[in-house]
Image: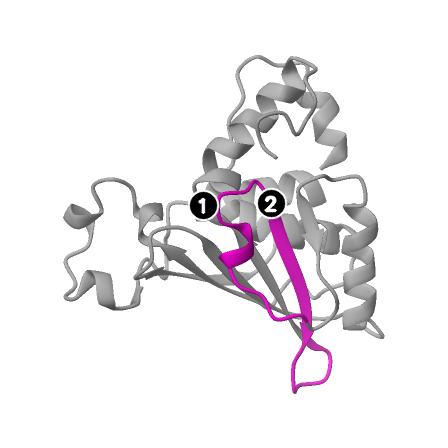
Amino acid sequence: MNSQKKVIKKYRIISNPGCYPTSIQLPLIPLIKKNLINTQDISIDSKSGFSGAGKNYKNKFSHKNFYKSTFAYATTNHRHICEIDQEIFKFTNKKIKYTFNPHLLPTFRGILTSIYVKGEKKVSAKKIRNSLKSFYKKSKFIKILKLNSNIGSGNVLNTNNCEISICNTRIKNKFVIFSAIDNLVKGASGQAVQNMNLVFNFPETLGLK
């Protein structure tokens, strides 16, 4: 968030966001702040390359055909839940109700998060997209795609970008928000470099183009 950039400059020890929370909070927080979506009925489905499980992933997951299958895990208490709760409340002063289901894919890197939301009265997908477009108009790494754009993690791999697509569904007033990042850059080291640039008054994109 642009307001946070000024705050970050005051500190020398900075806690960087986790990869799943990054892909979730970037699209959700502005919409919650603007009261555009129902905060009591949100479903979040995130799929990550297996690098997101850490270097000891083989000890953590024992399911068969690890490199050839999709695996769902930690559906009730993932370690990033507390961070999602903490930061959304911090920025919006609202407690939301949501489900969060992470999955590992048989690919090395990249995250695609699908967020299913219900719009408040007379809120359209176009209005949601325009709100995000306006909120992030000065952000160098957040790209709001055209309405109903197909999206995957392929375009963001090896970048510090987050691509977001707002799509209608077949149910009236129900929308899906897709958010794609590279968990090893925007979800990790890229944000660390970005914060370092802010702290030392370097160009924000230095080392990240």
Say the numbered circle drawn on residue 161: 2
Mark 1 lies on residue: 183
99 on left or right of 124: left
Tell which circle, 1 or 2, labels the residue nearer the N-terminal end: 2
Q: Position of residue 154 (x, y in %)?
A: 50, 58
What's the distance in space between the residues labelled 1 and 2, CA to CA? 10 Å
Q: Position of residue 131 (x, y in %)?
A: 81, 56
Q: Residues within 10 Å of mark 1 (few under 14, many from 20)?
A: many
Dot 1 falls on a residue whose secondary structure is loop
Q: Position of residue 87 (x, y in %)?
A: 59, 40
Count of marks, rendered view = 2
Of 7 and 201, which appears nearest the observer? Answer: 201
Q: Residue at x 53, y 16 (%)?
A: 13
Please, which residue is most extreme toward the bottom here? Answer: 170
* Quadrant of res 9: top right
Tell me the kind of residue under disc 2.
Asn
Of 108 and 15, which appears nearest the observer? Answer: 108
- Observer able to see residue 29: yes
99 on left or right of 12: left
Instruction: Report the magenta residues as a range.
Output: 149-174
